[in-house]
Image (cartoon, helix red, strand yellow):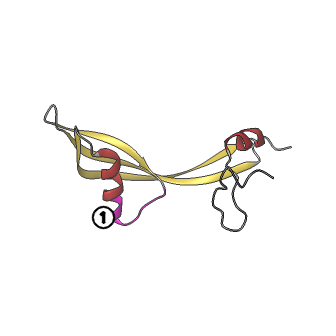
Amino acid sequence: MKKYPFTRTIASQRVTVLAFDKVNAEAFNMSVTISPVITDPAKLEKAVAAKVDNDTTKLIEIVNTETTEKVYGLTLDAFMSNAVELDPKTRKPLTANTTEA
């Protein structure tokens, strides 16, 4: 039996941004990971801002992006302990009431 019977290749972007620290009034670089890969610059900026912007930090600009692909795997036991049962037709999670037979 395979060690990792469930595998997925995930593409993501490591985005380096120039951000502003509102507390210390300093600009600094930080990195965030976005998945899936976004090619539209406006949509990418919006997705990055959603991860960076908060009460103390503000996105100034995107400095660099790097796209990577990694292969991830799960054993059957790990998959079963973390999986959610789905309706075969709609692919939506089944509620607790419909899983009982």
- Magenta-drawn stretch contains 37: yes
For the view shown, which residue lies furthest in the top direction? Answer: 24
Assign the N terminus to one quadrant of the image.
Answer: top right
Image spot of residue 52 (x, y percent): 31, 45
Left or right: 95, with 61 as reference point: right
Q: Considering the numbered disc 1 on the image, is that residue within a helix, a strand or a loop?
A: helix
Q: What residue type is disc 1 on?
A: Ala
Nearer the observer, 19 or 96: 96
Nearer the observer, 30 or 90: 90
Image spot of residue 87 (x, y percent): 70, 61
Left or right: 4, with 33 as reference point: right
Image spot of residue 29 (x, y percent): 27, 40
Left or right: 56, with 7 as reference point: left
Number of on-image labels: 1
Q: What residue is at 35 percent from the left and 47 percent from the top? A: 51
Q: Residues within 10 Å of mark 1 (few under 14, many from 20)?
A: few
Q: What residue is at 66 percent from the left and 67 percent from the top? A: 90
Residue labelled with disc 1 = 42
Compared with 98, 52 (above or below) is: above
Magenta span of residues = 36-44
For the view shown, which residue lies furthest in the left direction? Answer: 25
Left or right: 3, with 67 as reference point: right
Dividing the picture into quadrants, the one containing residue 73 is top right
Dividing the picture into quadrants, the one containing residue 9 is bottom right
Compared with 73, 47 (above or below) is: below
